[in-house]
Image (spheres, coloured by chain):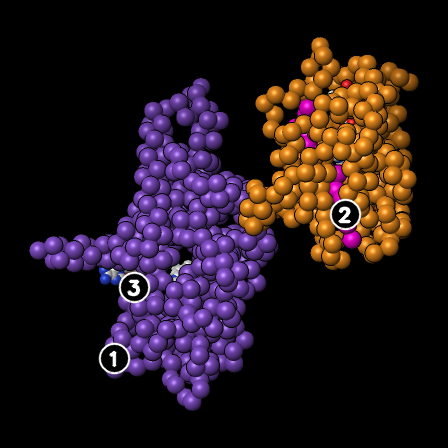
């Protein structure tokens, strides 16, 4: 089994600050980490490999510094790492990102592709499913449990708003995973030592045989009009007790607020 | 201070700090409260290759030395001495095999130990043999292809949890100190059982139990070195592991100081954070200075041992003595800086203070360390004449 994990390097903070004038992320002084959801994707790939054998490769698109995330992935036990980098990829939206990532996966080949549910900075949760579309393979998102991984198919449980679905997909397929799936392991010393020496294979649009107008800014139909932090939600209150008590409490509240 | 760690040494430090922060700090109070053995953490450490740190590469380890072990133990001890004692006692139990074992013994045991699959314990102490190992009463009698062991070891760290035990027993009482021998005994050997688990003041995550031998037959080839070498094996083992106890002292002292500084910056009395008071500042300055001095000594002793030097006894005793006295003093004063809060279990420092006390007692009390240091000085002076 060959598994590809897509990992994104993101700033280490849930509260990304935004420059109001330019509408872009303020990345200065914020250390970078592997997108937390993607660490669960790596763990899933490594444990499937432990069961079935094979190789795990990590793929990222990003600036040269993103190499650090790939080395971290290797320290956890990932076998190979690919960095898609170059000026031609700058300013990519989700479509252009997915186009580039699917380009690498076509080159390196994979039976199973695992992505995080979403990136904590972009938060769109679009890249995984888009990669699957580019590759024309099935995908299952929000996977919270891998029930069975085999050579030809994978059976998973995906999280839904109410309850969950059990889905089986034939391989090759792509899944996106949520935190509930597993507990990511820590690196090992041998892994860390390997990571220092490991070769990170770099690829540009030319190596991926992608025309430059489908990646980066040129390949991005999204135009960001405005970026803002939404205002806080108003206060909420949960009513307790029997239905009658709750109705009474609600009526009283509405009268007090002069709504009735 | 920069101790010019190599890239690999920094990796070890970083990894142990990560384990301490992510896996130990969140559970240390609960492990202490419930007196629970830290199996989960040991599994993480095994997966991270930490049990193989000081074991040669040919037996599946990483082939590092005393210094690397010191760094690992220091980092873990910043978070919890119960956890670091479990880890360090594993090394203590392994040294007899590492230093004196035959190639077969090494091949049989070291790979599993390096992988963290089987934990090790060292059994020397008995009811009548504490500081004075000469009081050892456990015996081993050769009968055909087996040694038959009888007696009881007490206060053995990792007792019951470990699967491999290195044990000292008397093979020939008429020979006095030259009549002791060291053996490898595996858990599950008929006639080998465990007594009660001790209830302790500190390091409550660490397990301390009796080892009970009743006509316990171990194969002849389980003897370490030769008959009569038992006390030498024990002394060389302690020479190797003692610096690790110093590293524990460093770690817990640093951990306590960090907590005290954090607290003192936030706690406001008389309109100021208490860290603004000179009395508090001076305590903090003294603590930090003592810790740095202890670190310099412990690191120097570990590097000296790694240089292949033979006369490590004096300096390793100094490192153990100084760093663990610093640990007791610093944890006590760190608690003082935090006032009543320091005394509460809500904060980690009261536990650090309870834990630190053991460091002045085990692997040779600090009185015994002073005896050893003085004896070495007397020997050196006699030689110089
Ligand atoms: C403040 C801000 C400004 C932005 N500005 C622009 C802009 O000017 N123009 C524009 O077109 N777009 C812009 N974007 C969108 C940005 O390009 C997307 O973040 C990016 O395309 C990836 O989408 P995502 O972060 O939502 O990832 P998601 O779709 O949420 O990520 C899901 C999963 O896909 C994988 N993945 C995502 N990205 C990568 C990657 N690079 N390498 C490897 N795997 C990956 C990971 O497995 C991840 O867990 C902006 C986003 C933000 C937050
Ligand atoms: C939690 C814990 C874990 C332990 N783990 C292990 C283990 O894994 N393996 C193992 O073999 N042992 C272990 N021990 C035993 C430990 O090493 C002994 O407790 C220690 O060596 C001291 O022996 P003692 O307690 O019998 O004290 P004693 O020898 O009875 O000493 C009592 C007091 O007299 C002092 N004293 C004794 N002799 C002299 C002297 N000649 N000069 C000056 N002062 C002296 C001592 O310093 C001490 O203050 C452990 C002990 C504890 C408490």
Placement of B5 over or under B301, stated as above or below: above
Q: Are marks 3 and 1 in contact (CB under 8 Å)?
A: no
Image coordinates of residue B181 in percent, x first then y, are 35, 75
Q: How many marks?
A: 3
Which disc, if any, is residue B222? none
Observer able to see residue A122: yes
> Which residue, given by chain and number where applicable, does mark 1 sit on?
B175
Q: Give the side of residue A180 with respect to residue B261, left or right.
A: right
Image coordinates of residue B151 in percent, x first then y, are 40, 78
For label 2, the crowd category at 10 Å Cα-Cα, with few meaning under 14, some 14 to 19 and many 20 or more, is: many
Rendered shade, chain A: orange
Which disc, if any, is residue B131? 3
For the point 71% across and 26% down, the residue is A86
Q: Nearer the viewer, residue A37 or B320?
A: A37
Magenta span includes A10: yes
Distance between the alpha carbons at the discs numbered 2 and 3: 58 Å
Query: What secondary structure is marked by label 3?
Result: loop
For the point 33% across and 58% down, the residue is B239
Bounds of the magenta segment: A1-16
Placement of A38 over or under A191, stated as above or below: above
The mark nearer the N terminus, 3 or 1, is 3
> Which residue, given by chain and number where applicable, does mark 2 sit on?
A3
The quarter of the picture where the N terminus of chain B appears is: top left
Nearer the camera: disc 3 or disc 1: 1
Nearer the camera: disc 2 or disc 3: 2
Q: Which chain: purple?
A: B
């Amino acid at each position: 089994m060959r598994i590809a994990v897509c990992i994104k390097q993101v700033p280490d903070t849930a509260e990304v600050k935004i420059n109001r004038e330019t509408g872009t992320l303020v990345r200065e002084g914020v250390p970078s980490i592997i997108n937390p959801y993607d660490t669960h994707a790596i763990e899933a790939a490594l444990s499937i490999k432990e069961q079935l054998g094979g190789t795990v490769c990590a793929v990222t698109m990003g600036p040269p510094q993103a190499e650090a995330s790939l080395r971290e992935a290797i320290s956890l036990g990932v076998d190979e790492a690919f960095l898609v980098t170059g000026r031609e990829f700058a300013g990519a939206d989700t479509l252009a990102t997915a186009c580039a990532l699917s380009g690498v996966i076509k080159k390196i080949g994979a039976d199973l592709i695992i992505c995080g549910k979403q990136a904590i900075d972009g938060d769109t949760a679009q890249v995984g499913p888009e990669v699957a579309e580019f590759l024309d393979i099935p995908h299952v998102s929000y996977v919270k449990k891998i029930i069975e991984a085999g050579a030809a198919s994978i059976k998973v449980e995906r999280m839904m708003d109410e309850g969950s679905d059990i889905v089986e997909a034939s391989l090759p397929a792509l899944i996106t995973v949520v935190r509930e799936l597993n507990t990511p392991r820590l690196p090992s010393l041998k892994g860390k030592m390997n990571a220092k020496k490991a070769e990170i294979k770099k690829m540009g649009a030319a190596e991926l045989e992608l025309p430059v107008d489908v990646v980066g800014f040129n390949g991005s139909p999204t135009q960001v009009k405005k970026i803002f932090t939404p205002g806080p939600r108003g206060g909420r209150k949960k009513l307790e007790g029997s239905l009658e008590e709750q109705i009474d409490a609600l009526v009283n509240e509405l009268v007090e607020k002069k709504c009735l | 201070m920069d101790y010019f760690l190599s890239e690999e040494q920094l990796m070890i430090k970083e990894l142990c700090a990560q384990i301490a922060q992510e896996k130990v700090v969140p559970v240390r109070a609960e492990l202490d409260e419930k007196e629970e053995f830290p199996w989960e953490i040991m599994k993480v450490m095994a997966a991270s290759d930490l049990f193989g740190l000081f074991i040669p590469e040919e037996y599946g380890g990483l082939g590092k030395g005393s210094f690397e072990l010191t760094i690992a133990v220091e980092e873990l001890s910043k978070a919890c001495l119960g956890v670091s004692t479990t880890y360090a006692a594993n090394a203590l139990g392994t040294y007899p095999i590492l230093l004196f074992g035959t190639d077969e013994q090494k091949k049989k045991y070291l790979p599993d130990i390096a992988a963290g699959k089987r934990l090790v314990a060292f059994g020397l102490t008995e009811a009548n043999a504490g500081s004075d190992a000469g009081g050892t009463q456990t015996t081993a009698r050769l009968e055909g292809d087996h040694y038959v062991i009888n007696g009881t070891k007490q206060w053995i760290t990792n007792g019951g949890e470990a699967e491999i035990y290195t044990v000292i027993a008397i093979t020939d009482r008429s020979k006095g100190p030259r009549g002791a021998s060291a053996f490898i005994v595996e858990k599950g050997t008929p006639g080998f059982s465990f007594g009660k688990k001790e209830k302790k003041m500190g390091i409550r995550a660490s397990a301390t139990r009796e080892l009970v031998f009743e006509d316990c037959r171990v194969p002849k080839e389980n003897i370490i070195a030769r008959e009569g070498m038992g006390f030498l094996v024990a002394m060389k083992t302690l020479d190797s592991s003692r610096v690790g106890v110093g590293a524990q002292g460093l770690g817990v002292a640093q951990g306590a100081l960090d907590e005290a500084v954090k607290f003192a910056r936030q706690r406001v009395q008389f309109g100021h954070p208490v860290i603004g008071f000179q009395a508090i500042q001076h305590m903090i300055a003294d603590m930090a200075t003592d810790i740095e001095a202890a670190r310099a000594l412990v690191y120097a002793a570990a590097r000296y041992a790694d240089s292949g030097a033979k006369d490590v006894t004096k300096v390793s005793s100094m490192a153990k003595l100084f760093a663990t006295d610093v640990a007791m003093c610093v944890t006590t004063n760190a608690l003082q800086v935090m006032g009543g809060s320091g005394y509460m279990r809500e904060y980690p420092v009261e536990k650090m203070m309870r834990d630190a006390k053991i460091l002045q007692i085990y692997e040779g009390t600090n009185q015994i360390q002073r005896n050893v240091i003085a004896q070495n000085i007397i020997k050196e002076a006699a030689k110089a004449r």
